[in-house]
Amino acid sequence: MSELRDLLSFYGVADTDYVENLVDLARRSGERGWTQRVGIALPSYADYIDYEQTADYIRSFQPHPPGSLRIAWRSWWRFACGPEVMKAQLGALQELAEVVELQVLPLSAGAHAGVMGSFVLFSFPTPAFSDVVCVEHRTGTLYMETPEETDAYTLTFDSLRSAALSPTESLDMITRVKQEL
């Protein structure tokens, strides 16, 4: 940090508070997410993709099936699509369950920790990188990295897993509903 102080002095920056703020920013530049905390930059969708690619463990809670399944799933409770579309969507969930651990939280579970909505919790293979929680909302995505924030979402996820059906029971339920259509 002495090099930075020397450079600032060389360029005539004499305000000691300003110098100390710049030195503090330089010191924190190696920290993950530091630009967000000081209001310099917000994470982008590219950051989200990077989190997906580098995380060694991803936990996700979705009150509705993810991605393209969402439209037909929502339509199913309104009976706006036919049984063939619903069967295809449930078949896609069956295929998804072959590559990820899928647990269904049935309506019969009642009130649960996920009433606030969906979130994704990324954990990384090295302790040098903190966990990251991503919460999508109407106008963007909120990225949280402090231990207090990520610990709260970890507890929420663990509570949801406890309330949900096991992966085997979840797949059985999906299969049963698909057969009933």
Image: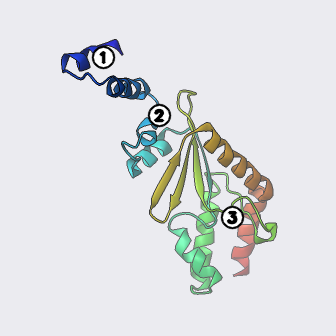
Q: Mark 1–mark 3 contact, CB under 8 Å?
A: no
Q: Amino acid at mark 3?
A: Val
Q: Position of residue 133 (x, y in %)?
A: 56, 47
Residue at 40% in and 47% down? 42
Secondary structure under badge 1?
Answer: helix
Q: Mark 3–mark 2 contact, CB under 8 Å?
A: no
Residue at 59% in and 74% down? 73
Reading the image, the residue beneath label 2 is: 32
Colour scheme shown: rainbow
Task: Spot the residue most to the left.
Answer: 11
| In the foreground, 21 or 57 | 21
Secondary structure under badge 2?
Answer: loop
Which of the two labelled residues, at mark 1 and mark 3, occupies the earlier sequence position? 1
Q: Position of residue 15 (x, y in %)?
A: 29, 25
Relative to residue 26, is residue 146 drawn left or right? right
- Judged by depth in the image, the label closer to the viewer, 1 or 2, is 1
Reading the image, the residue beneath label 1 is: 5
Q: Mark 1–mark 2 contact, CB under 8 Å?
A: no
Relative to residue 173, is residue 128 drawn left or right? left
Reading the image, the residue beneath label 3 is: 115
**Disc 1 to disc 2, C-alpha distance:** 24 Å
